[in-house]
Image (cartoon, grey):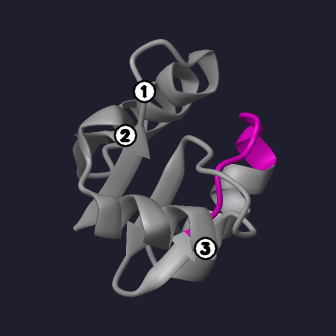
Amino acid sequence: MLKVYAAQWCPHCRKTLEFLRKNKIEFEYYEIEEQDDETIRKIEEVNGGDDWRVPTLEYDGKWREGKVFDEISLRHDLTAMGLFK
């Protein structure tokens, strides 16, 4: 299942979650600020090692770094992950 690491205060996270719900893509939501150190380190690594960015997505070992919401980019990345047709 798709894992979404996000924050309630993040407008790009809200738009991403809305897109996933609208397109009936199942996901598990993880509040970024409640994650353990190991998870935070992995998310930082995915995002270039400097810091964590949200929303960061993970599915079946494939990661999508945190980005500004862009529907075309999100569709492309979810298709590459095998979640969007």
Check disc 2 and give the amino acid type: Ile
Answer above or below: position of 74 versus 9: below
Residue 45, which numbered label?
3
Going from the N terminus, do you reach mark 3 or mark 1 first?
1
**Earlier residue among tags 2 and 3:** 2
Q: Tell me the SS state at disc 3.
A: helix
- Using the numbered discs, state the Cα–Cα distance from disc 2 to disc 1 in whole angstroms: 6 Å
Q: Main secondary structure of the magenta part?
A: loop
Q: Earlier in the sequence, mark 2 or mark 1?
A: 1
Q: Position of residue 60 (x, y in %)?
A: 34, 85
Task: Give amino acid for label 3.
Answer: Glu
- In the image, the segment drawn in magenta is 64-72
Q: Which mark is drawn over residue 7?
A: 1
Classify mark 2: helix, strand or loop: helix
| Mark 1 residue crowding within 10 angstroms, few (<14) / some (14–19) / many (20+) | some
Identity of the residue drawn at 31% across and 70% down: 38
Q: Residue 21: give its label.
A: none
Examine the rendered structure and indicate whether residue 41 appears above or below residue 67.
below
Residue 47 image-quadrant placement: bottom right
The residue tagged 2 is 32
